[in-house]
Image (cartoon, helix red, strand yellow):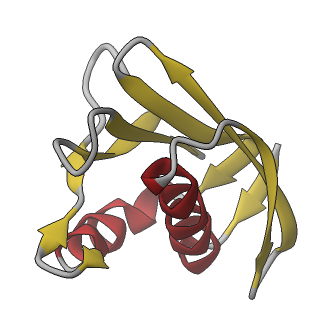
Amino acid sequence: MNHITRRSVEECIMHAYQKYLTSTQGNFICNTTDNGNITIQCVIHGDRFNCGFAGNKMDLNEINSLKNWCITHPGDRWSFGFRNTNPNHPDSVNVTLIKKTVLMFNFHVYLY
């Protein structure tokens, strides 16, 4: 597993968000500041726009900073929701957005 910075995670989330706005599925490259090219997978499953970056993990000590970042992003009077770790998902968090489009944005971030 690749360890990537929170800034790279944020850049990937915003890149996937742009695909979400147009319901564009597939694998996409995000050229991040800290970690270079990261492949993001985006797939529509039912009413969800599921996305993430398989094989990459963020430091679990960055969870609160990512959660705080969600409050002011994506912007334009919208903010991402945040599902923290829990017993069913001890090694991942989700960044979400509901009702911006007909789909729910759901970005999976795995942790180390």
**Image spot of residue 90 (x, y percent):** 39, 27
Q: Residue at the spot x=48%, y=49% of the render?
A: 20
- Residue furthest to the right: 37
Q: Position of residue 60 (x, y in %)?
A: 46, 54
Looking at the picture, does residue 63 appear above or below residue 34? above
Task: Place residue 67 in its image quadrant.
Answer: bottom left
Residue 93, compared with residue 11, is above or below; it is above
Q: Quadrant of residue 37?
A: bottom right
Q: Answer left or right for 88 relative to 58.
A: left
In the rendered image, residue 32, in percent from the top left (x then y), is placed at 75, 78
Q: Quadrant where the N terminus lies? A: top right
Residue at 33 percent of width and 33 percent of height: 103
Between residues 16 and 90, which one lies in front from this camera angle? 16
- Name the residue located 42 percent from the left edge and 63 percent from the top edge: 61
Which of the two residues, 37 or 77, is positioned nearer the viewer here?
77
**Residue occupying the far left of the picture:** 77
Up/down of 86 relative to 32, above or below: above
Q: Is residue 80 left or right of residue 24?
A: left
Figure check: 61 above or below 40: below
Apparent side of residue 104 relative to residue 112 in the rendered image (left or right) = left
Tally the marks.
0
Residue 90 visible within the image: no
Image location of residue 62, percent across then percent down? 42, 67
Q: Is residue 65 visible?
A: yes
Which residue is pictured at 74% across the width and 58% down the height? 3
The answer to whether 111 appears left or right of 37 in the picture is: left
Foreground pick, 1 / 44: 44
